[in-house]
Image (cartoon, rainbow, N blue to C red):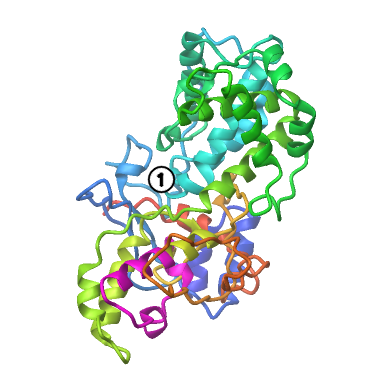
Amino acid sequence: MDCIKAATLLKGSLWFHLFLLTICSSNLLYVISEEKLPPSPTSTSQLVSLPSSGIFEPIEISPSVLPHYPFLGKTLPPMYPAFPKTYKPVLTGKCPFNFSSISNIIEKTASDCSQLLAPLVANVICCPQFGSSLHIFQGHFTKSSDVLVLENSTADDCFSDIVEVLGSRGANSSVCSFQSSNLTGGSCPVKDVNTFERTVNTSKLLNACSVIDHLKECCRSVCQPAIAEAAFQISSLASNSDNIHVLNDCKGVVYSWLSRKLPSEAADSAFRLLAACKVNKVCPLEFKQPVEVIKACRNLGAPSPLCCSSLNSYIAGVQRQMLITNQQAIICASVFGSMLRKGGVLTDVYELCDVDLKDFSLQAYGEEGCLLRSMPADVVYDNSSGFSFTCDLSDNIAAPWPSSSSMASFSLCAPEMSLPALPTSQTEYPGCNGFLLDVLIFMFVLFIVPLND
């Protein structure tokens, strides 16, 4: 009977019927749709309210991070999907550029920065892709000229148009810190092609970044040092070349030159990988001082319900911030563990309380954590199935407990460091007969808007 009810809710496409068949063949899992008004968030930091139990219960997202729907006061149909609105962009008319020439990059960026998911994937997916799209736009815009950057006024207009074009496709690029000044070259002393190519060994730069080894670049870099060397060479022409801001501005000029020389897809792949190398070196989560955890877990010699309850409660608050990668989770677990050790917690409470790496990332159903792959990933949008991406871990890997309270020498590339094995296979959702966890975000979108009474 429950499967018949689910069929009534999910009918409408072959995909839905296949999904229904999977559900019904997996121990008759239940699909439940709640009808209630969207809750009023107590603060903008409360992005996600995780369900307390149940596999397919709806995940509630604060309306502060959702696109506005003018008819929320009316009764919505059951399981209304919160797909982002699209509209015809209103451009400034002052940016002489045909955006259709990089339409594939624009569409990819709009999908990766969807209004619905942008706050949750900003660090790993959205902002790296948005940054890559700006580099590619800059290279294409200046391709027919002898300069590598945009004038300030043109940069303002073009940046506004880029944001408008992305917004018209349902994207939210405001979660990223990029500005129109990123297109101008800033304080870099070299902004024209001739001076750049006289100063830089362009053959070496192009050879290093044309084809990047995705498995080696982050730890045995080839393209990154080539870009850094080129940026240093052109920045050295400035009187204050030691200024880190000058060097960073010159890196933007190097990216622009590469975007002129490489096909859009190749440039995007390279820039995304370089961004992944950078973001995977840092834990993006914010940790408040774990005073209560330290108080409950100090001087432990055996499992303690009070300690584990306090620890799990603290981590539950942290994991709501965003989705992170498997490598970021290793660093985050070590950072938090170091904070606990510094507070006097010397026992491995991760092991005592069964804390896994995935516990540091957003939990989909209150039970299923998702760690994104360390390699660049994208959000895929489909008119029928909604948004999807693939989680990387296929089993529960214990969070590593740090050997000391210091993180000064921590490195994922150190050969002497023993890291938990990261599986190469994609995660499959348990109980769905092999259905990839790409369905996670479909269910996420499907239940995302609470319904009225």
211 vs 284, left or right, is right
Whether 78 is drawn above or below 152: the answer is below
Residue 153 horizontal/vertical position (percent): 47, 9
Which residue type carries mark 1? Pro
Is residue 281 visible from the viewing direction of this image? yes
Q: Mark 1 points at which residue?
A: 119
Whether 388 is drawn above or below 192: the answer is below
Whether 334 is drawn above or below 101: the answer is below
Query: In this view of the protein, which residue sits in the foreground, 229 or 365?
Result: 229
Is residue 383 visible from the viewing direction of this image? no
For residue 342: magenta?
Answer: yes
Residue 371 horizontal/vertical position (percent): 52, 62
Question: For the point 26% across and 76% down, which residue is it?
Answer: 344
444 vs 258, left or right, is left
Residue 453 horizontal/vertical position (percent): 26, 54
Which residues are the magenta region? 334-362
Callout count: 1
215 vs 312, left or right, is right
For residue 83: magenta?
Answer: no
Question: For the point 70% across and 28% down, which residue is it?
Answer: 258
Question: For the point 47% across and 68% down, which residue is it?
Answer: 358
Query: In this view of the protein, which residue sits in the foreground, 353 or 331?
Result: 331
Circle 1 — which element? helix
Around disc 1, counting alpha carbons within 10 Å, would you say few (fewer than 14), some (14 to 19), or many (20 or more)? many
Residue 367 horizontal/vertical position (percent): 42, 72
